[in-house]
Amino acid sequence: MPARCWVEVGRLDDIPCCGARRVTRADGSPPIAIFRTADDEVFALVDRCPHRGGPLSQGIVQGRAIACPLHGWVIELGSGQAEAPDEGCTATVAVRRVGDRILLALPEGEMAAPPGEAA
């Protein structure tokens, strides 16, 4: 397994409350969606719904979950699991806050572009 390092990708204020930002990856891997809850918790998932690949970053944050904008599947932000009766999972990405800074755990040497416009 490749070594990982923490990469700063933005600040808490870059993400609207109950919203998301999308981070692109330099290696062409699928983008990462970073979510901010009403309680200022941050979570990161690969930006693909397990159902049909919809952009989760364009969904609606509901508590600690995100509703996919395409078909309404609800995905738990902490685990990436779809809520029943739906089944499936999207990959989580390790994320942490240091003060107001947001850091992602990415493979060593991989860079990420700062969060884009609000999703």
Image (cartoon, rainbow, N blue to C red):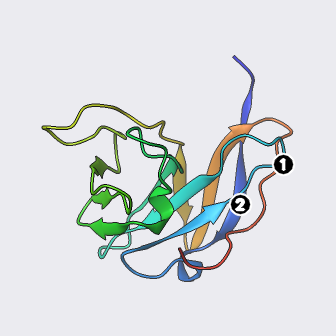
- Identified at 56% across, 79% down, the residue is 118
Give the x, y percent position of residue 84: 14, 38
Q: Which residue is mark 2?
A: 8
> Mark 2 vs mark 1: which is more N-terminal?
2
Q: Determine the residue positioned at 21% across, 37% down.
A: 86
Q: CA distance from mark 2 to mark 1?
A: 14 Å
Q: Which residue occupies 40% across, 81% down?
A: 17
Structural crowding at the residue carrying mark 1, measured as other residues with C-alpha within 10 Å and reported as few (<14), some (14–19) or many (≥20): few
The answer to whether mark 2 and mark 1 are in CB contact below 8 A is no
**Residue type indicated by callout 2:** Glu
Q: Nearer the viewer, residue 73 or 98?
A: 73
Counting the numbered discs, the total is 2
The amino acid type of the residue labelled 1 equals Ala
Residue 89 rendering spot, x and y as whole percentages: 37, 33
**Label number found at residue 26:** 1
Above or below for 91 versus 74: above
SS label for mark 1: loop
Tell whether 43 sits left or right of 47.
left
In-front residue for pair 74/20: 74
Q: Observer-nearest residue: 71 or 17? A: 71
89 in relation to 54, above or below: above
> Quadrant location of residue 70?
bottom left
